[in-house]
Image (cartoon, rainbow, N blue to C red):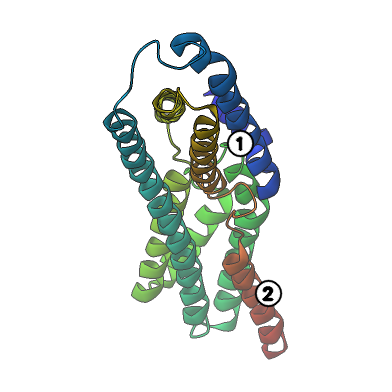
């Protein structure tokens, strides 16, 4: 977990170009070591100490790496889509509560609008920053408890259903949004990537130029895959992080509704 927190706090918030530079530097350095040190020492100056290595060996490693990358990338993107849909559903449910509040008496309607505004403000200003630092909790905040009391007091079935959907979406946003690839998965991914560099280096042991070209292509491929996975690794961290735009619209709607309703008192 400390390694994951380090990446979360110091690497993922960087611009994409900076993340790409770090990843390329790491794998480029490793490829140079394989090209200049590892392969010549294992295979000799002429690259024939072990004889020829069949292309099926690096192909098998590349296939295994590709399947593992695909498996984890699909999980990351599906998680990203689920969190995005949960945010939309949550905002839609809160908007439905505001819509139903228009049919209530002025005092009750304004109390509900104020409760929605306070809850949305808490989500934006308190809970959202916590999501970026793994400190968010699915326990209900005081603002949500106050909103629950008012909604239940209204005895409006549609409003109660909308609140239930908002709570379910919030739980999904937090629980799924805070999930991440385990250290074991990242370790296996790094191991397979290193093994791919090593086997492709051995495949071209007899030709330094061919080895350099092959290692360059493999390094670029590995780096691109890892950069794409890293920038999507956390839904609430980095340049592609979700922003509470939909909830800000709910907050604006609630505040403007209270302002509009005030002259009718």
Quarter occupied by the C terminus: bottom right
Query: Which residue occupies the foreground of this view, 172 or 28?
Result: 28
| Residue 200 occupies quadrant | top left
Q: How many marks?
A: 2
Query: Which residue occupies the foreground of this view, 36 or 123?
Result: 36
In the rendering, which numbered label is found on residue 123? none
Residue 191 position, x and y percent, is 43, 24
Residue that badge 2 annotates? 255
Asked if 35 appears above or below 246 in the picture, the reply is above
Crowding near pointer 1: few (<14 within 10 Å), some, many (20+)?
many
Residue 95 position, x and y percent, is 51, 74
Asked if 76 appears above or below 204 in the picture, the reply is below
Q: Is residue 51 left or right of residue 262?
A: left
Helix, strand or loop status at disc 1:
helix
Residue at 59% over, 65% down: 247
Residue 154 position, x and y percent, is 44, 72
Helix, strand or loop status at disc 2:
helix
Residue that badge 1 annotates? 23
| Residue 163 occupies quadrant | bottom left
Q: Is residue 128 left or right of residue 188?
A: right
Asked if 157 appears above or below 104 in the picture, the reply is above
Would you say residue 167 is visible in this rendering? no
Mark before the other along the chain sequence, 2 or 1: 1
Q: Residue furthest bottom?
A: 264
Q: Residue furthest front?
A: 46
Residue 2 position, x and y percent, is 57, 22
Crowding near pointer 2: few (<14 within 10 Å), some, many (20+)?
some
Per the model, the C-alpha gap separating discs 2 and 1 is 46 Å
Query: Which residue occupies the foreground of this view, 195 or 227?
Result: 195
Asked if 4 appears above or below 222 in the picture, the reply is above
């Amino acid at each position: 977990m400390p390694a994951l927190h380090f990446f979360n706090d110091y690497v993922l918030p960087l611009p994409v170009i900076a993340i790409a530079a770090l990843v390329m530097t790491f794998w480029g350095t490793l490829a140079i070591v394989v090209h200049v040190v590892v392969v010549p020492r294992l295979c000799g100056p002429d690259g024939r100490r072990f004889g020829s290595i069949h292309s099926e060996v690096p192909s098998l490693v590349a296939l295994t790496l590709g399947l593992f990358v695909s498996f984890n990338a699909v999980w990351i993107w599906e998680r990203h889509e689920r969190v995005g849909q949960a945010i939309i559903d949550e905002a839609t449910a809160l908007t439905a509560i505001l819509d139903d509040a228009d049919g209530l008496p002025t005092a009750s309607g304004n109390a509900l609008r104020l409760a929605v505004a306070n809850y949305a403000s808490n989500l934006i200003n308190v809970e959202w920053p916590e999501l970026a630092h793994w400190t968010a909790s699915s326990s209900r905040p005081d603002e949500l408890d106050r909103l629950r009391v008012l909604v239940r007091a209204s005895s409006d079935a549609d409003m109660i259903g909308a609140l239930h959907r908002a709570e379910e979406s919030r739980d999904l946003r937090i629980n799924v949004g805070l999930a991440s690839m385990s250290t074991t998965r990242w370790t296996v991914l790094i191991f397979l990537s290193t093994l791919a560099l090593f086997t492709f280096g051995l495949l071209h042991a007899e030709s330094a130029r061919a080895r350099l070209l092959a290692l360059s292509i493999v390094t670029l491929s590995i780096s691109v895959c890892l950069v794409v996975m890293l920038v999507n690794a956390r839904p609430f961290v980095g340049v592609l992080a979700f922003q509470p735009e939909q909830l800000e619209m709910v907050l604006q709607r609630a505040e403007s509704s209270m302002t509009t309703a005030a002259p009718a008192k």
